[in-house]
Amino acid sequence: MATIRYNAPDYYQVDELLTDEHKLIRGSVRDWVNRAVMPEIDDYNHRHEFPVHVVKELGELGAFGPYIPEKYGGAGLDQISYGLIMQELERGDSSIRSLASVQSSLVMYPIYKFGTEAQRMKYLPKLATGEMIGAFGLTEPNHGSDPGGMLSRITDAGDHYILNGAKMWITNSPICHVAVVWAKDDAGVVRGLLVERGMEGFTTPETHKKWSLRSSSTGELVFDNVKVPKENLFPDIKGLKGPLTCLSSARYGIAWGVIGAAMDCYDTALQYSLERKQFGKPLAGFQLTQKKLAEIITEITKAQLLTWRLGVLRNEDRATPAQISMAKRNNVKMALDTARESRQILGAMGITGDFPMMRHMMNLESVITYEGTHDIHLLITGNDITGESAFT
Ligand code: TGC
Ligand code: FAD
């Protein structure tokens, strides 16, 4: 196996803002990514295949629900630890971070926050170890950016609900054991419920031919008169606030995660530019290469500071959804631009799977779309600063 020579960029000594525990956690995830992800992730992408074995290993690493209390199988860590874990995983591949994001923020978090004690005890410990995989169903074929228009319905049928509808573009759907599903009740109010694989009428067809997140398993959730026991409903959370609260947690993780992809691209391009010679000197010696690298490291540094501050606010439970939107939007665009610019520094070599840029670039096209598109997050900021909604 080739030696991995990763020098994580830290131009403003942001590491000094981290505790020893933060650095220890980051180091163990980084080692795992070097060992378990880096050597084979390009092949999995080429094969359009989900690396099943990472699930248990991520569970052992504590990457599922790291901020969920230990009582429920989580690690009880703070939000900055969560961010650093996402950053290391996405340096490996956005698919691996996606798996962990969905499991942590979109499945374990709502069960912890909105679930009954019985639901928590039943699902959280198994989700934490990876014995169970979860999915989150909000998006529908005709309602993506506007989830409030969803058509999925639960009908009260005495001791159970009948669920009908379909969710599309769902990470982990083909491999999930349980799905957190959002649907409207008889009164037209959005409710959340837990749907288990094996329930009659519940199917999870896979989505094929993706050019992005090819190592992530994506599919639909189809509900055809599915009988869901009443105890599977989240009892108290009503309205879009439920799913959007989960999205705030996942978007926060993405804001950190994508910096990892950008750091990987930057470090690769810097090393390459120092070694590759043209016109008798290293590419790094040309002003136009330096412009690219200098701009990239500036943007990475700004993103690192933005997320660190957001992490502090989140630890104090003070981060607003709009602040999280700003960081998600800024950092994903930064990472996508970084992948494109750093790919250019490698010339033709940059388009091969021997280097990570094209893979990150293709992955980031999904990341800039899911969890709220780039433009939706801009409108959230616009709404926040003006008080005027431009959505409708
Ligand atoms: P709006 O009226 O603004 O809000 C409804 C209620 O929700 C509250 N709220 C939030 N709460 C917590 N966190 C947030 N981020 C929140 N945003 C809004 C809000 O205060 C209100 O509460 P209340 O008590 O007054 O009822 O709702 P709207 O219908 O106008 O929609 C606003 C909009 C467009 C911003 C929202 O719908 C949106 O964010 N759309 C984008 C959809 C989206 O992000 N979908 C993601 C699907 S999941 C996914 O992509 C997973 S990918 C995972 C992976 O693989 O990593
Ligand atoms: P649309 O909402 O149709 O938007 C299309 C375009 O129109 C976008 O550019 C958008 O910005 C723009 N637009 C829409 N409304 C406005 C407006 N008011 N003003 C200006 N422009 C607007 N969803 C889940 O629920 N769970 C998952 O696990 C999940 N995983 C995903 C995994 C992948 C790989 C992908 C690609 C998507 C996933 N999604 C998931 C779905 C994702 O959240 C949606 O794709 C996203 O919210 C956008 O919805 P849409 O694709 O329907 O686009």
Image (cartoon, rainbow, N blue to C red):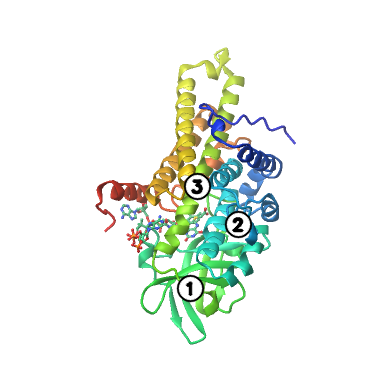
Residue sitting nearer the eye, 234 or 130 = 234
Residue furthest toward the right? 1
User: In the picture shown, does residue 28 fall above or below 49?
Assistant: above
Among the two numbered marks 3 and 2 on one chain, the one whose residue lies closer to the N terminus: 2
CB atoms at circles 2 and 1 under 8 Å apart? no
- Dot 1, crowdedness within 10 Å: few (<14), some or many (≥20)? some
Q: Tell me the kind of residue under disc 3.
A: Asn
Q: CA distance from mark 1 to mark 3?
A: 26 Å
Question: Visible in this render: residue 123?
Answer: yes
Residue at 59% across, 40% down: 91
Residue at 57% across, 22% down: 273
Tag 1, which secondary structure?
Answer: loop
Residue at 57% across, 56% down: 104
Q: Position of residue 315 (x, y in %)?
A: 50, 47
Quadrant of residue 52 within the rendered picture: bottom right
Q: CA distance from mark 2 to mark 1?
A: 21 Å
Q: Which residue is mark 1?
A: 235
Q: Which residue is mark 3?
A: 315
Tag 3, which secondary structure?
Answer: helix
Q: Position of residue 218 (x, y in %)?
A: 55, 59
Q: Which residue is mark 2?
A: 69
If the image is split into quadrants, where does the C terminus sit?
Answer: bottom left
- Dot 2, crowdedness within 10 Å: few (<14), some or many (≥20)? some
